[in-house]
Image (spheres, rainbow, N blue to C red):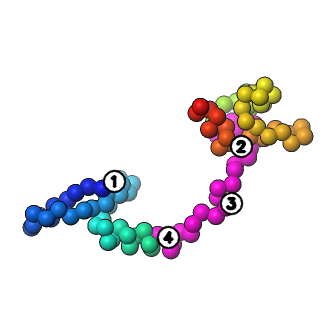
Amino acid sequence: MVAQAAAPSCSAVNRMVIVPFGSAVLALNDADFEEALTRGREIVPAASPSATAPQIVDAAGAEAATGVPASWWLEAARRGDVPHLRLGKYVRFDLTKVIEAAQK
């Protein structure tokens, strides 16, 4: 979110970047914002491939994530109503794909 703020002692408009931070708000000028981004990238490394790996869960895990009973997940998989993986007798769900399918 970018806002315009005027310095009290002059009529020039300064560009500020407003960042909600808990119950407070940070107001940074462009230079300070760019410096904070640079420092943040140094402190927090880029997402690793494992961070973007699919979250595969069983029916109990799908229940814990969604609040929908495990029995419903297993029956929906049997009918082919939800995306799932069948590994022999085991049924697993990719939570990302399940949520995407539910939003369609």
Q: Which residue is mark 1?
A: 1
- Of helix, strand and loop, which one carries label 3? helix
The reply to whether callout 1 and callout 3 are in contact (CB within 8 Å) is no
Which percent across, then down, holds residue 38?
44, 72
Q: CA distance from mark 2 to mark 1?
A: 34 Å
Label of residue 94 in the image: 2
- Going from the N terminus, do you reach mark 2 or mark 3 first? 3
Q: Amino acid at mark 3?
A: Ser
Left or right of 78 in this view: 44: left
Q: Amino acid at mark 2?
A: Asp
Query: Is residue 48 or residue 62 the one in the foreground?
Result: 48
Which percent across, then down, holds residue 41?
49, 70
- Of helix, strand and loop, which one carries label 2? strand
- Of helix, strand and loop, which one carries label 4? helix
- Going from the N terminus, do you reach mark 4 or mark 3 first? 4
Q: Residue furthest right?
A: 88
- Going from the N terminus, do you reach mark 1 or mark 4 first? 1
Q: Residue at x 67, y 61 (%)?
A: 49
Magenta span covers which residues? 40-65
Q: CA distance from mark 2 to mark 3?
A: 15 Å
Q: CA distance from mark 1 to mark 3?
A: 31 Å
Q: Please rate how many residues cluster around mark 2, counting C-alpha atoms within 10 Å: few if below 14, some from 14 to 19, many from 20.
A: some
Q: Which residue is mark 4?
A: 41
Q: Residue at x 13, y 64 (%)?
A: 12
Among the 4 quarters of the image, the one containing residue 6: bottom left
* Residue 54 is inside the magenta segment: yes
Left or right of 3 in this view: 49: right
Among the 4 quarters of the image, the one containing residue 78: top right
- Going from the N terminus, do you reach mark 1 or mark 3 first? 1
Q: Which residue is mark 3?
A: 50
The reply to whether callout 2 and callout 1 are in contact (CB within 8 Å) is no
